[in-house]
Amino acid sequence: MATQTIFDLIAAYNVKEFGAMGDGNGDDGARINEAITYVSQQSRANGLLFVPPGTYRIYNTPIAPVSNIMLFGMGAVTILQLGTGANVDIIRASGISKLRLKDLRIDGNRANNTDGTGNGVHMVSVTDSWLDNVEVVSCRGDGFYGNTLSRVKFTNCQSSDNGRHGFGFDFVEYCRFFGVDAFDNSRVSASGVGDGINLDIFSHDNTLIAPACYESAETGGRQGYGVREASAGGCNRNLIIGGTFRANATGDFLLGPDSLAISSLGILRETLGLGTTSPDASALLDLVSVTQGLGIPIMTTVQRNAIASPRAGLVVYDTTLAKLLVRVAAAWETVTSA
């Protein structure tokens, strides 16, 4: 259920006032665009345009939002669906700012669109915008595609069963993703080509918090990486915090040396530096300081012996023995000076 207030609904215009039917027949795209143009010029609506429950078919004309508009529905029961044989994007936003899309389901109707690479939401040169609770399914191209985005926020969005990527981006910066889901994608591309979230070509300084990227089937899935960052595309300083990653065909992450993933899987990065912005490439962890040292875990002999299945190379400081010890094969050995 949508979270709009009664005040939003009172102030907003309704796409049905402009002839959109929402009955799953005909072409509602041009009528919705007419409503967008009109509402953007009216102070009463504050840019609010309501799409009530129904199935709105889009054929020759993608929905084209403008700046300072909010297009919102009632969640899963407000469906923007690509018409049979249309082979176009469903929503296409270009050169705008302060767009808001909320509580919409976008259906690419891939079974009845066999040509082209139409995306669910296609954004080019969009800034300072927010997509909230938008679900995209069954597109031939990407669920969400963005090129040259800055400060765009995605919250609780979901992208599944799409032909290529769930979320595909080029030249995006300072974007934030909170609780997005990307699963069962790469349904048209060869297995492993489409990813859950794909960051390409100079995409930098983006943050993903608690994404869920996976294949529903534990085996035989097609979605490549959960999150892939272009290795030669100038991507850097992207951050992943938490999330769920499971059964992706190629792997959970592919990140460059200057990006970081912190999850239940550990900290994933080619080289991590503390106290330096240029860690040595030969070091997995490069610690630099002239005032502090490295603190080894400190414990008693009883506590050390209670460690379950200690791996070779494990190092601890034993306070009972007042010695530094390292695990070698099946025994602990004291570290001594040469």
Image (spheres, rainbow, N blue to C red):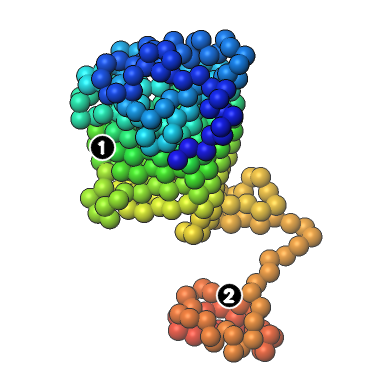
Left or right of residue 306: residue 134: left
Q: Quadrant of residue 23?
A: top left
Q: Position of residue 84 (x, y in %)?
A: 22, 21
Give the camera-side residue of 6 and 301.
Answer: 6
Rendered residue at 40%/52% (across/down):
245
Q: Is residue 233 visible?
A: no
Q: Quadrant of the N terminus?
A: top left
Give the camera-side residue of 117 and 79.
Answer: 79
Rendered residue at 22%/19% (across/down):
85
Image height of 21 relative to 196, above or below: above
Total number of numbered discs in the rendering:
2
- Indicate the amino acid at tag 2: Val
Left or right of residue 274: residue 125: left
| Circle 2: element type | strand
Image height of 117 relative to 270, above or below: above
The mark lying in front, picked from 1 and 2, is: 1
Label 1, on which residue? 187
Within 10 angstroms of label 1, few (less than 14), some, or many (20 or more) residues? many
Give the camera-side residue of 146 and 327.
Answer: 146
| Circle 1: element type | loop
- Indicate the amino acid at tag 1: Arg
Rendered residue at 41%/40% (across/down):
158
Q: Earlier in the sequence, mark 1 or mark 2?
A: 1
Q: CA distance from mark 1 to mark 2?
A: 47 Å
Image height of 294 relative to 192, above or below: below
Label 2, on which residue? 315
Q: Position of residue 298 (x, y in %)?
A: 66, 78
